[in-house]
Amino acid sequence: DKLSALVKKDSELKDFEEPATVTKAERLMEAMEAAVKEAEASQSALGDVIRLAKPGREELRAAAQYYPLMYFVDKNFSSTMQTCSGAIVGKPIVGESMDGCASACDFAIHSCVGFSYFGTGSTSLCFLFSGLKSAVYYTGCKEIKTVENKNSLLQKKE
């Protein structure tokens, strides 16, 4: 809209022999250049948001290459429900499968070392981590199975 308005103003200019008209035309050209740069920045930011919404192609069984964090701490608790904290890569991803979350981590190969995944389908939440600082494992939770037959930390109505 901004660029269209500037083009319309440009088409209204007449008599380029007048110094004032030439000066107005030069100011319009400068404004157009700034509007184009602004539009390019907005387009780039939109691309980042779109990549976050759908980070890349989901590879089936991509999650199989990742181990639960407790596997590296105490294998006896690797099947318990766990949460972790650390430096996050990007923003949380919503609505991906666990394989989609793992694929997003694989796609961010130089910055992602692991992920935390909660939920299933459109209610899922995925956090990618560049490093892990702490972990909590839950041994007293009643085991709840999800559609994917995995443990879940989300409460469900029964």
Image: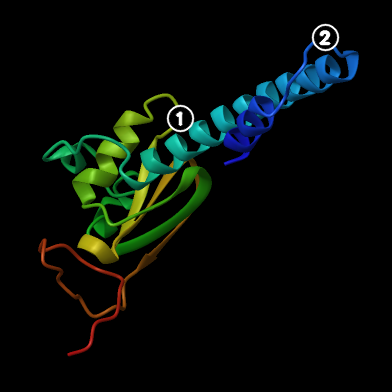
Residue at image x 20%, y 61%?
A: 121
Residue found at the very far right of the displayed protein: 19
**Left-right relation of 144 to 53:** left
Nearer the camera: disc 2 or disc 1: 2
Q: Callout 2: helix, strand or loop? A: loop
Q: Quadrant of residue 103?
A: top left
Q: Using the image, determine if residue 83 lies above or below residue 132.
A: below
Residue at image x 19%, y 75%?
A: 144
Residue at image x 23%, y 80%?
A: 142
Q: Which residue is mark 1?
A: 111
Q: Residues within 10 Å of mark 2 (few under 14, many from 20)?
A: few
The kind of residue on which mark 1 rests is Ser
Q: Mark 2 to mark 1: distance in Å? A: 58 Å
Res 80 seen here: no
Nearer-the-camera pick, 38 or 130: 38
Mark found first going from the N terminus, 2 or 1? 2
- Residue 101 x/y as whole percent: 28, 46
Snapshot colouring: rainbow
The kind of residue on which mark 2 rests is Glu
**Left-right relation of 130 to 100:** right
Q: Quadrant of residue 21?
A: top right
Name the quarter where the C terminus is drawn. Answer: bottom left
- Residue 26 x/y as whole percent: 78, 16
Q: Residues within 10 Å of mark 1 (few under 14, many from 20)?
A: some
Q: Quadrant of residue 146?
A: bottom left
- Residue 125 x/y as whole percent: 35, 59
Q: Which residue is mark 2?
A: 17
Labels in figure, total? 2
Nearer-the-camera pick, 39 or 51: 39
Name the quarter where the N terminus is drawn. Answer: top right
Q: Using the image, determine if residue 61 lies above or below residue 106.
A: below
Nearer-the-camera pick, 96 or 129: 96
